[in-house]
Amino acid sequence: MPQKTIIDVKHNVSLAESSGVTFMSIKIPLPKIKEGIKLAFQKCDEHLRSAEILASEGALPNAVVSLEFGIEELGRAIALIEKHKAGSEDIETKLFTDHDYKYNKAWTVLPQSLKTIYEGSFDPAIFDPNIFDVGKETISPRTRLDATYVSYDKKLKSGKWEFEPIETKYEKSSTK
């Protein structure tokens, strides 16, 4: 399907359609994109420093939230760098709204081994997961939400509130 573009000159916004996927973009001048790269790296650093402080105080779920936001800001910086290198001033608005997009963009440069934020002490191939801690948790936009909110287990109908799942896992592994 050929690309179709509608441009709103007043708001400097365009709506593009390519391969059946519709996305909005905005025009940002190249010098402003360069400024955005610097600011995204600065915000990434602030989130990572916050995560370090929170983790040192034992507030692991909150540290995970800051860590994930730092990863997303890194993803934003990478996307802006790519646009700047290409000389493109068309920035898709998902760069400002889509957590998964920014997260995935960051992991194009980060080592995959850094995704693991928790790993159980026991090998799942050997130990019964109903008895031993064999779990593995990786950082993701979903993990950020799990660490942020209190939730009720609706799927399993266990009648349990879910709160700070990451800290609970760390506490379990440290008592073994």
Image (cartoon, rainbow, N blue to C red):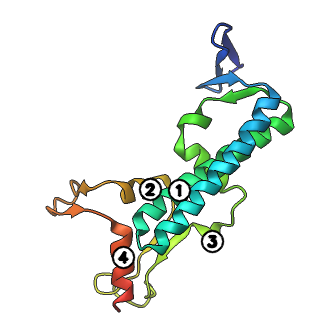
| Residue position for label 4 | 169
Looking at the rendered structure, the secondary structure element under dot 4 is helix
Residue drawn at the location 33% of the way across and 83% of the way down: 172
Residue 29, compared with residue 119, is above or below; it is above
Q: Residue furthest top?
A: 10
The front one of 96 and 22 is 96
| Residue position for label 3 | 113
| Residue position for label 2 | 144
Which image quadrant for residue 109?
Answer: bottom right
Which image quadrant for residue 153?
Answer: bottom left
Residue drawn at the location 49% of the way across and 74% of the way down: 56
Residue 33, compared with residue 74, is above or below; it is above
Q: Amino acid at mark 2?
A: Arg
Distance between mark 4 and mark 2 Cα atoms: 15 Å
Q: Earlier in the sequence, mark 1 or mark 3?
A: 1
Looking at the rendered structure, the secondary structure element under dot 3 is helix
Q: Residue 165: image x %, image y %? A: 34, 67
Q: Earlier in the sequence, mark 4 or mark 2?
A: 2
Q: Residue 155: image x %, image y %? A: 23, 55
Q: Earlier in the sequence, mark 1 or mark 2?
A: 1
| Residue position for label 1 | 68
Q: Is residue 41 left or right of residue 123?
A: right
